[in-house]
Amino acid sequence: MALLELQGVTKRFGGVVANQRVSFTVREGEILGLIGPNGAGKSTLFEVITGTFRPEAGTIRFAGHSLVGLRPDQVNRLGIGRTFQKVRPFHGLTVLENVMVAAMQHRPSPAAARVEALRYLEVVELAEKRDSYARHLSVGERKRLEMARAMATRPRLLLLDEVTGGVDQKTIPTLIQLIGRLRGEGLTLVVIEHNMRVIMSISDRIVALHLGEVIADGPPAAVGSDPRVIQAYLGEAFSAEQPGEFTKVPVNSPG
Amino acid sequence: MPSAHPPSPGPTSPAPRRQLPGGAVLLGLLLLAALSFPYLFQLPYHRDVVIKLYLFAMLAQAWNILAGYCGQVSLGHAVFFGAGAYTSSIWQTAWGGSPWVGLAAGIVIAVALSLAIGYPCFRLRGHYFAIATIAVGEIVHTLAINWEFIGGARGLTLPIRKDSLADFQFATAKYPYYYIILGLLILCLLASWWIERARVGYYLRAIKEDSDAAQSLGVPITRYKLIAMAVSAGFVAAGGTFYAQYVLYIDPDSVLPLSLSILVCVLAVIGGVGTLWGPLVGSAILIPLSEFTRVKFGGTGSAVDLLIYGALLTSVAVFQPAGLVGLVQRLRRR
């Protein structure tokens, strides 16, 4: 069943077309990878879905609601959580307070929000840092904090923008495991990722964008060997490797 | 009868609090000192200084709810002060109403004004919001000067009545003014204390830190900015009515000047912006300082108090952006 459905979504900035008639669907319970070179319009698409930018044309439907024209807070309340490409923690709040702000949407009392926030901090393994100020966290920790914060709003769909970007190699497996655990909690995910090993191994399906347009949509192996994708993004070095080499990271299957 | 389940003080059970926390003791002493002050200091001059101190502490605390917690720096708060002062005064001079009803009407009008000003201005961010509030403040000041119904540039003189609570006038005794403004200040502090602990306080701080991130977490940011603005404006308007009843004469230059908006901001910034006690601490230092330097150097012409404000403000901005309260917190953590 389609949870999110984009139909002909077009977003321009003056003369620059960031998204050109983008159409694809995200099915309930799947992990959809969104790939493409810098400037392909991946992050813009997130901003359009979440209501930061209003598209010039096209429709976006999520669980029976039209999203076009809604504000980001309204989109979030309908059940879409997101992280930012450049992390945006509340620096002057503690780690716990960061997540409490998010949890208060469903748990208005601070005491109840604290309990719930701690649960999400345990999921991302940041519970022991709960009293540190967010500004004192490493980049990897900030990424995890942002995921905990987004999850605490209890979304059905989570949009993750470059979770492994700027993170050291050691931390990447932890983040991949975390994404698997999120799916285990019944979440549907759309993941923007530049790390090809990561995206190929975690995604059920991949959509490739180039110059604002969808150039491929299908299973990872098929998209990884698509000549247009290779030319636009992956390059010859990558195509020499067989996409089949990527071992599937053991993640909980949906449902 | 012995209990079936005797408490077993294991290593995990929390240690019982054996003593009152130092903060509570200090707070009790402060309150006691505040309540007994008019009996210890009988001179009208001393009472006048402390009444002003409380009034400005309340205004700065109200400003702090919007600017300190929510990060929306307003430099037009004199508008709400003037709204309170003018509404309750006109209520009495033109319609012969009670000043207390006038106080309530002033709060209602100030809240309505704050929403009307806030809704368009909150589309602006950071410094642009502050500049817009300066502009609004100056427009309202100019309008008041040219509006004959409210006295224009001549201002309004309130009819002098005998001391009574119903008329909100205590020209001979003075001390009721003291307790009324102390009550207002405590109310404002309690409101801030409650806000800090409630969901609204968490939301305001999140909006101050990063409004886009807050909005992505489902926080309706404009609504919460407007809530902070309305609460802030309501308290400032109450302060305006109090001022009118205390001085019994108002004009645009005394209740609507830009300098008032700036002073309120300066007090909070020096004391500690976004803290519960900062605005009170700032006022407790600067208001008496300003009064004593005026007495010492004569008139307002020498403006020594403004020199000291300037020096303090610069030092805070450079060395201790969290203000004096932030400095104390930093020293205690060592």
Image (cartoon, rainbow, N blue to C red):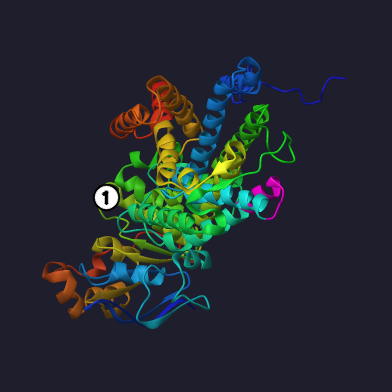
Image quadrant in which you'd find residue A221:
bottom left
**A169 with respect to B131 (left or right):** left
Check the residue under mark 1 and report the chain it is in: A
Q: Position of residue A175 (x, y in %)?
A: 35, 53
Q: Main secondary structure of the magenta part?
A: helix
Residue A65 visible in the snapshot: yes
Res A21 → quadrant: bottom left
Q: Position of residue A49 (x, y in %)?
A: 40, 71
Q: Determine whether A73 is above or below A215 in the image.
A: above
Number of numbered labels in the structure image: 1
Residue B278, percent across and down?
A: 47, 32
- Is residue A132 toward the left or the right of residue B88 in the image? left
The answer to whether residue B105 is magenta is yes
Q: Residue at x 48, y 34 (%)?
A: B279
Identify the residue under disc 1: A167
- Range of residues picked out in magenta: B95-106
